[in-house]
Amino acid sequence: MPGWLVLIIAMSAACAVVVAIALLRPQRLGEDDDSSQTPDVLEYMTMMIGVVYAIVLGLAIAGVWEARGAAEDGVRTEAQALHEVSERAAVYPTAVRDKVRQDIDAYVGHVVNEEWPHMAETGTLTDHGTALLARVRHDVSGHVPRTDVESQMYQPMVDQVAAADDARHARAQNAAATMPGVVWFGLLTGALVTVGTIFTLQIRRSGRELMMAGVFSSLIAFLLFLIWQFDSPLGREAESVAPFLDLFPGAVASG
């Protein structure tokens, strides 16, 4: 299901539930009750609950956003390192150069076409992808330099393969969700408590009050969806694979 459709359903459901509760709940107040005379302590508690929950939401959004940025940097590092190896292999003999580039293309094609969907579904990488990267490492480190130019390129290429391997391990750690279950329990419980406090302010059935209650609940649903969307940095964002698509368009198409 597309993310935008999930967002629309969540916001609509939150708004509908709050409005339905406001319309269907029994009115226990007397006809002569003055709805403007809400106890000051209730207003203060409602305000404090909203402030505390807003701080929690802000920290959660900042945390998942930072994790998403770090994960995307790792993907760019992995793709760029492999691209550097492919380009620097030009100084090697034709057979070695073609073998290095062929194995890099095979690895990239597997990552984009097979490993990425697997990673999004299970939160883990594939053994075949690990084997393909090991083959690239063997291609680079197994060639004995025969000229000065090859000698100058050898160590930088080995370092770039190591950087790609390190970025791959970081991608494995970022493949799963970053928010613990207890945090999600707190966020959802806080949302229910925060939305529930609006009924302590003697909300009536006027159009203005119902509209504000619906907008408030929809806003909280949107913020929770935002956290959920960014919670899996590499799983729900199709554009996170863009560095591989940009640097290896041929390998991705052939894979």
Image: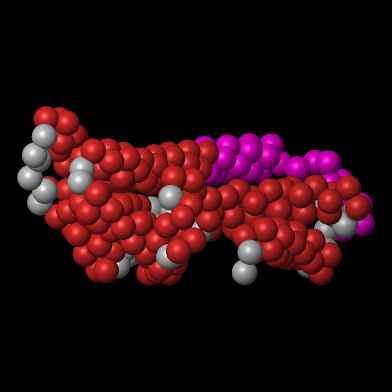
Q: Which colour scheme is used?
A: secondary structure
Image height of 202 relative to 56, above or below: below
Place of residue 3 in the rendered image (x, y in percent of width and height, measured from the top left): 62, 60
Pick the front one: 208 or 248? 248
Q: Is residue 35 magenta?
A: yes
- Horizontal side of 31 relative to 78 (left or right) equals right
The answer to whether 184 appears left or right of 210 in the picture is left
Q: Number of marks in the image?
A: 0
- Residue 166 is covered by the magenta coloring: no
Query: Left or right: 70 with respect to 212?
Result: left
Q: Where is residue 163 drawn, in percent x and y? A: 23, 42
Query: Residue 78 is drawn in which quadrant?
Result: top left
The image shows residue 172 at horizontal and vertical percentages of 30, 56
Name the residue at 83% across, 58% down. 29
Q: Is residue 178 above or below residue 23?
A: above
Picture residue at 16% right of the left edge, 42% below the top: 158
Question: Over which residues does the magenta segment extend?
Answer: 30-57
Residue 61 can be seen, yes or no: yes
Quadrant of the image containing the N terminus:
bottom right
- Residue that appears at 57% across and 50% down: 226
Q: Main secondary structure of the magenta part?
A: helix
Whether residue 190 is visible, yes or no, is no
Decide if residue 7 is on the left or right side of residue 126: right
